[in-house]
Image (tube, rainbow, N blue to C red):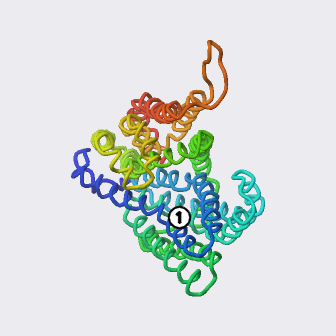
């Protein structure tokens, strides 16, 4: 089989490796940063429509949509790994199969969500406890914006495909264009056309459709001249087992991640309004670090899958070592910045002195955050790229279990009791869960990178 990576590999080692990592990671970081802008722009427009209920409804509706897309994150991750392996092996048929199957599954899930929107709205309303105007408006927003979920999920799948094809520029471009379209259409429909809060939701849905059409055009342009197999091959029985195994593990992993995130917010809200606000402020430090590390993880997915699929173990090991070096540098850099300037950064984010004072009391956790969590991010990229998602699920479940135990189980006067922790213990549990994830994956890493594993992945491509 002709190797698709042979033009990029010389003597088994990837040339200009730092440049390759940067070309994949930097656009991915920019793309990640644009993700919160979608909700931020809708929130900003809703905040100028004359009712505080709109802001509350927007927060609840955004949470509904985020949960849906979060649980469907496997559409991006699994597609990247499968495509990267196919790209490395020069298997254009597998590239087509992964693309068509991922988009088909994404649209199928999207249509199912549209059909189940009413039960989902009732579930989320019960979960968040929203009622009155806030509940009514959040249900209204979701009932409109839900029509943009099928194209949004398809865009996730196609973005993952592009990353597997060693291109993070198109996903970045589509994310930026979609956000700009969302802002423009929401302003046009909500304010200029006078549709108010409904216009904001329609603007989001329309922007998702236009963004999906843009990335679909880019995909067709990328595959122009590449022979497409017959439909019975694309959607036939072959290869579905690996596809569903990889993505089922990623789905369950996402559920574990969501359980920890929801628990952080839920427990924080029970510790008081000021503590909840301080935790939200501190979480921004984690989010910003995750933007950078996710970019490196995307590069890890693309490169490890590519070189494993090509059977180039020496190039694979070189890529892993270089990405680990980049990750270590980023962890030390962010830890230093957080140690020296955490209070100044907090003051830029909020002007509430009480919240800054509470959050500043936990600066030690912010200093440790990059150092203890970096491994979880970058190792995820390696395991996704090499399609070893079951190990990721095991590591995430182990970390989640430790988090739940440290959060809710305590020793009081020699007795084991179940109850709420203080905020210091909550953050200790949060950092421990990420450290456990990284530790388990690191322990299993030599097996992942073994010659036997690479050979097996190459032969099953």
Which residue is pictured at 45% across the width and 74% down the height?
A: 180
Q: Between residues 128 and 21, which one lies in front from this camera angle?
A: 128
Give the farthest residue toward the bottom.
193
Q: Between residues 222 and 111, which one lies in front from this camera angle?
A: 111
Which residue is pictured at 35% across the width and 61% down the height?
A: 27
Which residue lies under the disc numbered 1? 39
Answer with left or right where residue 135 lies relative to residue 260. Answer: right
The x and y percentages for residue 179 are 47, 71
The x and y percentages for residue 273 are 58, 46
- Relative height, residue 296 to residue 107 (above, below): above
Can see residue 301?
A: no
Disc 1 crowd, CA 10 A, few/some/many (<14, 14-19, 20+)? many
Which residue is pictured at 53% across the width and 35% down the height?
A: 423
Which residue is pictured at 28% across the width and 54% down the height?
A: 20
**Under tag 1, what secondary structure?**
helix
The x and y percentages for residue 191 are 56, 83
Give the farthest residue toward the front.
353
- Relative height, residue 189 to residue 22 (above, below): below
Quadrant in which residue 135 is drawn: bottom right
Q: How many marks?
A: 1
């Amino acid at each position: 089989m002709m190797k698709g990576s042979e033009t990029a590999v010389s003597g088994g080692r990837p040339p200009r490796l730092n440049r390759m990592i940067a070309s994949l990671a930097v656009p991915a970081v920019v793309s990640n940063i644009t993700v919160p802008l979608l909700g931020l722009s809708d929130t900003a427009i809703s905040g100028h429509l004359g009712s505080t209920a709109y802001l509350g409804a927007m927060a609840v509706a955004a949470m509904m949509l985020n949960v849906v897309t979060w649980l469907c994150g496997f559409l991006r991750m699994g597609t990247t790994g499968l495509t990267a392996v196919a790209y490395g092996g020069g298997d254009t048929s597998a590239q087509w199969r992964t693309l068509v199957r991922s988009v088909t599954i994404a649209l199928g899930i999207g249509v199912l969500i549209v059909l189940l929107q009413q039960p989902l709205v009732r579930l989320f309303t019960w979960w968040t406890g929203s009622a009155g105007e806030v509940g009514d408006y959040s249900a209204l927003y979701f009932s409109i914006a839900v029509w943009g979920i099928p194209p949004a999920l398809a865009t996730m799948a196609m973005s993952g495909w592009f990353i597997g094809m060693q291109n993070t520029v198109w996903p970045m471009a589509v994310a930026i264009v979609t956000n700009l379209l969302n802002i423009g259409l929401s302003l046009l429909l909500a304010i200029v056309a006078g549709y108010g809060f409904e216009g904001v939701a329609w603007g989001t849905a329309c922007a998702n459709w236009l963004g999906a059409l843009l990335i679909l055009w880019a995909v067709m342009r990328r595959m122009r001249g590449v022979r497409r197999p017959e439909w019975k091959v694309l959607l036939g029985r072959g290869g579905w087992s690996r596809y569903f195994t990889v993505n089922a593990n990623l789905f369950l992993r996402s559920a574990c991640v969501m359980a920890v995130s929801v628990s952080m917010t839920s427990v924080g809200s029970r510790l008081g309004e000021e503590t909840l606000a301080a935790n939200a402020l501190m979480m921004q430090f984690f989010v910003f670090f995750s933007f950078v590390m996710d970019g490196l993880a995307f590069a890890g997915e693309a490169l490890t899958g590519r070189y494993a699929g090509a059977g180039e173990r020496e190039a694979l090991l070189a890529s892993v070592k270089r990405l680990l070096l980049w990750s270590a540098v980023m962890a030390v850099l962010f830890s230093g910045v957080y140690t020296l300037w955490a209070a100044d950064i907090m003051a830029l984010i909020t002007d509430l002195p009480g919240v800054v004072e509470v959050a500043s009391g936990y600066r030690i956790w912010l200093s440790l955050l990059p150092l203890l969590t970096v491994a979880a991010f970058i190792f995820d990229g390696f395991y996704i790229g090499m399609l070893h998602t079951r190990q990721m699920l095991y590591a995430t479940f182990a970390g989640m279990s430790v988090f739940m135990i440290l959060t809710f189980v305590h020793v009081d006067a020699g007795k084991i009791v179940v109850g709420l922790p203080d905020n210091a213990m909550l953050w200790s549990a949060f950092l421990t869960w990420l450290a456990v994830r990284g530790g388990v994956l690191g322990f299993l890493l030599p097996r992942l990178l073994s010659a036997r594993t690479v050979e097996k992945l190459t032969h099953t491509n």
